Image: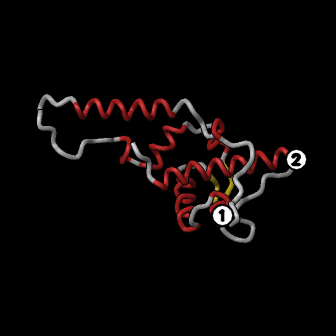
Amino acid sequence: MQPSRATELGIRILMQLAALENAALADSAQPSRHTSSSIAHNIGAPQTHVAKVVSKLAELGMVNSTRGRTGGIVLTPEARTKKLGTLMQELEGPRLSNYRVHDPCPFDPECQLHGVLQLAAQQFFDHLDKTTINDIVPEFPAKAKLA
């Protein structure tokens, strides 16, 4: 099982936004909106990739994203309690959730390989569903490493 780079970025974006929100609340400040550019800088990812993933996260209801002078990206309340396995399946689409062996099994029609791999994939997501974004948010938001 190997999630795509976009799925990994999606999870890192949500973690970063939650950490920034936590930091603002700890300082008794109103959580601010962040740009895809600032998030990209903080997590060390290309801005174009982050913008594309933010769009997908908005589609899934994990962030609210608005354009313009007063715009930005903020977490939705649902994002913090989203189960990680479910989120990964939504970000990946059918690529990981409908895992299939690419070549026909030489033992068809009695081949057990497909069933075993699908069960393993389901157990993978079930295990991840025990964790939410809130569970993996770091105490402090990421800081970009300046070279």
Q: Is residue 86 left or right of residue 99?
A: right
Q: Residue furthest bottom?
A: 69
Residue receiving disc 2: 28
Residue name at image x 15 percent, y 38 percent: 105
Disc 1 to disc 2, how far (Cα)?
25 Å
Left or right? Give the position of 59 relative to 133. left
* Camera-nearest label, 1 or 2: 1
Q: Nearer the viewer, residue 128 or 73?
A: 128
Q: Position of residue 104 (x, y in %)?
A: 15, 42
Crowdedness of circle 1 by 10 Å Cα count: few (<14), some, many (20+)?
some
Tell me the SS state at disc 2.
loop
Identify the residue at image location x=57%, y=58%: 54
- Which dot marks residue 135? none
**Dot 2, how many residues are within 10 Å of its Cα: few (below 14), some (14-19), or many (20+)?**
few
Q: At 53% from the left edge and 50% from the top edge, which residue is drawn?
A: 60
Q: Say whether residue 127 is visible.
A: yes
Seen from this angle, which residue lies furthest right?
28
Where residue 42 sits in the image (x, y, percent)?
Answer: 67, 59
Quadrant (top left, top right, bottom left, bottom right) of the C terminus: bottom right
**Residue 11 image point, x, y percent:** 57, 48
**Residue at image x 84%, y 44%?**
26
Q: Is residue 23 left or right of residue 82?
A: right
Report which quarter residue 35 is drawn in. bottom right
The numbered disc on residue 41 is 1
**Closest to the observer, 3 or 33:** 3
The percent position of residue 114, horizontal first and vertical second, equals: 24, 34
Q: Secondary structure at mark 1?
A: helix
Coloring scheme used: secondary structure
